[in-house]
Amino acid sequence: MNDPANIIRVYDRAYVHPEHLSAFLRATMHFYNARPTIRFEMPDQGMSVIGLESDTANFSVVSAAEEHLAPLYATGQTILVASIDRALEDVRAAGGSVVQVKTPVPPGFQARGRLPGGNVIEFAQWDHAEPYRNPDLSDLGIG
């Protein structure tokens, strides 16, 4: 059985090409009254990740060129967890499989699991997130 105490927050994934990122963020922040809570870059993939949170919805906005986004489209959610290891154990216990093992990212770690039926979830464990919290988006024209 899944350990619900392991789940901290659930984010819907949004994939955005860089040329549309500013407009997407402005519209989403306005529509959901969302605020940016985390931002980090993955330069080796030309990728920017921005977390938006509101009282009604949370988004993990992934922005990169199409060749970097396309392999990720099957991932529909990011779930912030206390322990990725525990989350992957829960995926296996449900009859699912590990798609990506625990991998370092700037704010901590990520992994992916596929549940029976095909739903792919990214798990994030943010052990080093403090430098990335409450980001300034002024370089994107958002202030």
Image: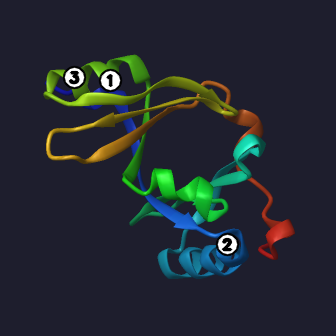
* SS under mark 2: helix
Amino acid, disc 1 = Leu
As measured in the structure, the alpha-carbon distance from the residue carrying label 2 to the one carrying label 1 is 31 Å
Amino acid, disc 2 = Leu
Q: Residue at x 66, y 78 (%)?
A: 20
Q: Is residue 109 above or below residue 13?
A: above
Q: Residues within 10 Å of mark 2 (few under 14, many from 20)?
A: some
* SS under mark 1: helix
Q: How is the image coloured?
A: rainbow
Quadrant of residue 9 within the rendered picture: top left
Residue 102 in percent (x, y) is at: 49, 22
The residue under label 1 is 88
Quadrant of residue 143 within the rendered picture: bottom right
Q: Is residue 126 above or below residue 51?
A: above
Viewer-proximal residue, 32 or 117? 117
Q: Residue at x 66, y 59 (%)?
A: 64
Does the rendering let one see residue 61? no
The residue under label 3 is 92
The residue under label 2 is 21
